[in-house]
Image (cartoon, rainbow, N blue to C red):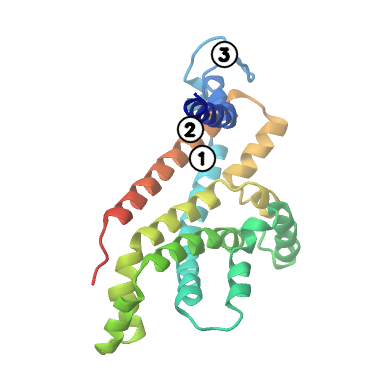
Amino acid sequence: MARTLAPLLSGAGLGALLFFLILPTLIIIPMSLSTTAHLRFPPSGVTWGWYAAFFNDPDWMAAIWFSLRIAMATSLTATVVGTMAALALIRGTMPFKAAFHALSIGPMIVPHIVLGVALYLVFSPLRLTGTLAGFLIGHTVLAVPFVVITVTAALQRLDPSLELAALNCGANRFQVFFHVTLPNIVPGVATGAVFAFLSSFDEATVAFFISDVGGKSIGRKMFEDIDFNLTPVIAAASTVTVCASLILIGLVHLIARAGQSQPQQE
């Protein structure tokens, strides 16, 4: 009986924990459909008017497009930098490799509020606050660790003898990377790119420090509306953001499954 009950109890406990974690996200969906002009749960009625107000508001749309541009640029730059860093860490022979690996994933460990204050103190004299370049630099720092982790895992699964065979056949390092290494780690690189996009688009703490009136991300816009204009529009914006994130996470899952089923290319 103990052997039978233990898996059931552990499964029930895990299910309860996951439900508790996801409950706040589930609550905002009915709150975004409320007919009242303030946040209320359970809603007194159902209306799609707050979604219409969200998509018709130029301030919200400006924040969305600003965040999308930053996220796409961050995904590109972080993928390139993170892939090269992972390649150097796994295939390179540089000294103090462990220290460089710790530094490459350091932004995941350091609290974002500390990074936000530091970036603001650096960007403010350079007039980079609220600019695409400033956000790109700050978010790339935050996104590179995700790419390093996923690409490092892909490189560790790749048989290095394939690269050595290409070198023995006369290929140079660039040819080996583009014709042997990269085709075999594409799922890991693509997964890192998606995570980099999500880490930039959903980031709010650093964005709060480096935003200004001219350049405002969706995270900063949400913070402002919570303080000054708390209506169900904020719940509608949150629901749209969550749905977009879930779609991208599903894409990551499909990429990971494709990478596991794909044999190594020789």
Closer to viewer: mark 3 or mark 2: 3
- Distance between the Cα atoms at labels 1 and 3? 26 Å
Residue 145: % across, % down: 55, 61
Residue wearing tag 3: 43
Q: Hey, what amino acid is under mark 2?
A: Phe
Query: Who comes first in sequence, dot 2 or dot 1?
Result: 2
Task: Compute the Cα span from label 3 to label 2.
Answer: 21 Å
* Three-letter residue code for mark 1: Met
Image mark for residue 55 = 2
Mark 1 or 3, which is nearer the eye? Answer: 3
Looking at the rendered structure, the secondary structure element under dot 3 is: loop
Q: In this view, does 158 lie to the left or right of 145?
A: left
Q: Which residue is drawn at 59% across and 63% down?
A: 105
**Do labels 2 and 1 touch, CB within 8 Å?**
yes
The image shows a total of numbered marks equal to 3
Q: Circle 1 is placed at which residue position?
A: 61
Q: Is residue 76 visible?
A: no
Q: Position of residue 25 (x, y in %)?
A: 55, 30
Residue 153, above or below 181: above
**Residue at the (68%, 55%) spot, across then down:** 210
Q: Do the residues labelled 1 and 3 touch (CB within 8 Å)?
A: no
- Point 44% across, 64% down: residue: 151
